[in-house]
Image (cartoon, rainbow, N blue to C red):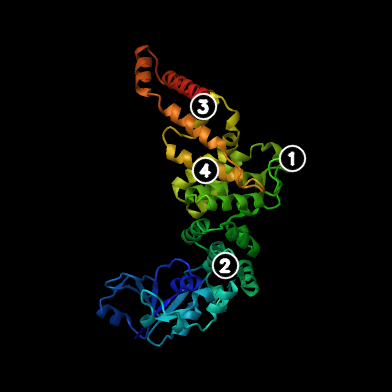
Amino acid sequence: MQTYLVGGAIRDALLGRPGSDRDWVVVGATPEEMAAQGYLPVGRDFPVFLHPETREEYALARTERKSAPGYRGFVVHASPEVTLEQDLARRDLTVNAIALPSAEAGATLDLAHLVDPFHGRRDLQDKVLRHVTDAFREDPVRILRVARFAARFADFRVAPETMALMREMVAAGEADALVPERVWQELARGLMEARPSRMFELLRECGALAVLLPEVDRLWGVPQPEAHHPEVDTGRHLMLVLDIAARLDAPLPVRFACLVHDLGKGTTPADALPRHIGHEQRSVGLLRDVCERWRVPVELRELAEVVAREHGNIHRSGEFGAQALVRLLERCDAFRKPARFEQALLACECDARGRLGMEDRPYPQRERLLAALAAARSVQTAPIAARAQAEGAAGTKIAESIARARVAAVAEALATHE
């Protein structure tokens, strides 16, 4: 029985990056032998065990054979006869198909003893993402993984033969067989990488974006009003927005809101674009379709809807008086969910700065709206409601009294600060 460290931990050590989780493969063992040594079985589809002390994952060496469409359509064969090279051959990219004997995998990895049958180390040096074998085509999730790695390693290129293979997979309908949980998992991880735009550009290049996110794919070629968008193309603008979100270290809900904030422009008649007629509501409807299709968490969907519906008004809010500001805060549900409103403002800042030559431009709307929100929230609503009730008011009348008090507070704050 031999144990090897495999995959991301070695790749990242070779790149001098912070360490990934450590994954291990065991050659020459049976499930019974692993259990006898205290390893806890956790694998559902193939034999994976947790180390009795470190709780790291140890998988028996295995091969896989395609048996049906989709990423679950595999017959897995794990036995003591499966070699390390056979196990590495089923992996996605050469840079992830490198192993190191456990004896050399201490606190500091002894990389002189690498097992690298598919030349992953050379591809790391050449900055190339290349599939290991033709078995890559058997798992469509790998299309998303390559795109995600392209977003993480922004200076790497995808090997031409790998891109050609990905296009063949999309044309064969493999991307249609992807299940929502895996798609969302990979999209969410890709959005959180250093340069998320590369994920979507690569998916578009191989044709997968039109299958998975046609609402986003349609944005390329849609003109933007040139006076506000020097980059002109809506798809290009979206990529700039995503990369600004990464630069500002925005959390996942903000990055997802950035991704889907302008979907309606892909269905807006060209002659309506300069005035953005109705595209906000179309964006909301389309992003709901995306969220339903890929089972996006509710809190992300709710933030995205606020941003899609109101980002134009938030951009123009510097022109608003106190009454219009309070109405905007009410529509954004900012009084009940101030933290979410702050995230919406960050998404809008990313949108405003995601334009050629405007990446470092300040976004004063954010500070002004947060000041307005603080002033409005300082109003004590309970006494106002009690007084209105004592005067015989009810329902909307009470709400109007509270709104008037908030407008007055905001007006005073604006007068003080402006």
Residue at the image position 45 percent from the left and 47 percent from the top: 298
First along the sequence among labels 2 and 1: 2
Provide the residue designation for mark 1. 271
| Residue type at tag 2 | Glu
Q: Are marks 2 and 1 in contact (CB under 8 Å)?
A: no
The residue mark sitting in front, 2 or 4, is: 4
Mark 4 element type: helix
Q: Is residue 335 above or below residue 245?
A: above
First along the sequence among labels 2 and 3: 2
Mark 2 element type: helix
Q: Quadrant of residue 318?
A: top right
Provide the residue designation for mark 3. 417
Percent of width and height locating residue 105: 38, 78
First along the sequence among labels 1 and 3: 1
First along the sequence among labels 4 and 1: 1
Mark 3 element type: helix
The answer to whether residue 343 of the structure is visible from this angle is yes
Q: Nearer the viewer, residue 286 or 364?
A: 364
Percent of width and height locating residue 354: 61, 47
Q: Is residue 293 above or below residue 337?
A: below
Provide the residue designation for mark 4. 346
Q: How many marks?
A: 4
The residue mark sitting in front, 4 or 3, is: 3
Q: Nearer the viewer, residue 387 or 154?
A: 154
Residue at the image position 57 percent from the left and 32 percent from the top: 317
In space, the residues marked 4 and 3 are separated at their CA atoms by 22 Å
| Residue type at tag 3 | His
The residue mark sitting in front, 2 or 3, is: 3
Q: Is residue 154 left or right of residue 334?
A: right
| Residue type at tag 4 | Leu
